[in-house]
Image (cartoon, rainbow, N blue to C red):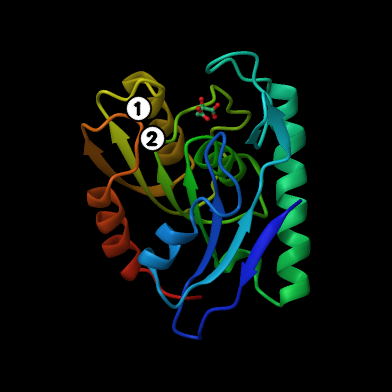
Amino acid sequence: MHYIFEHGTKEGKNLLLLHGTGGDEHSLIEIARFLDANATILSLRGTIQEDGMNRYFKRNGLNQFDLESLEKETDHLLAEITAISETKGIPLESWIIVGYSNGANIGAHMMMEREASIKRAILFHPMSLGVDTNLAQVNEGTIWLSTSENDPIVSKEASDQLIFQLEKHTFDVTVQKKNSGHQVTMEEVEHAKKWLSTLDNK
Ligand code: MLT
């Protein structure tokens, strides 16, 4: 996978960036630096191509997810993150995912469905992918996420369903509700930044 890795300082968090459909490893760097100017950053480009746009798993139309691809690519992504973390000497559990849209969706899926995974995340406009193989699995962790009432891609049902799933998996979920479509706004980034500052560095 193509990725960017940047060492931060000891005071910084470890931020793992997962872009939205059509983005790449550069898309969330500016937001990550705003969230924490001292952060160590790992940003991975999705390997699936859809009409020239990068994604992390296949779909057969808007919100018609290819669940076989989702499982395969979740394993692939986690293996890649694990290998890079080992090479760089960074514990897997110290990463905080910063994901947007498609990247937030695979990030949430990975956190709920894979046992040895990441426990903390900032998820901009995520949704349920309609998969939960083991709702009783206790993952523990903490997640900040944003939803928007007039989001043309993520319905209220799909975001409510994800929050329900995350809470069943015993994640502590902080929800920022707004009304600004599927875009990431400055207001939500500022809100996420404040939340992030309350976490320890691990
Ligand atoms: C997805 O495919 O993960 C969601 O529809 C969000 C997106 O448009 O990428």
For disc 2, the marked residue is 163
Amino acid type at circle 1 is Asp
Q: Relative to the observer, which residue lies in front, 130 or 27?
A: 27
Q: Is residue 171 left or right of residue 87?
A: left
Specify the label residue 160 is tagged with.
1
Amino acid type at circle 2 is Ile
Measured from the top left, where is residue 101 in percent x and y? Answer: 47, 36
- Contact between labelled residues 2 and 1, with CB atoms less than 8 Å apart: yes
Measured from the top left, where is residue 5 in percent x and y? Answer: 64, 68
Q: Is residue 5 left or right of residue 196?
A: right
> Residue at 35% across / 31% down in the picture?
182
Q: Is residue 192 above or below residue 132?
A: below
Q: Secondary structure at mark 1?
A: helix
> Residue at 46% across / 33% down in the picture?
165
Q: Is residue 152 left or right of residue 170?
A: left
Q: Relative to the observer, which residue lies in front, 9 or 137?
A: 9
Q: CA distance from mark 1 to mark 2?
A: 5 Å
> Residue at 54% across / 45% down in the picture?
19
| Residue farthest toward the front in the current orientation of the protein | 52
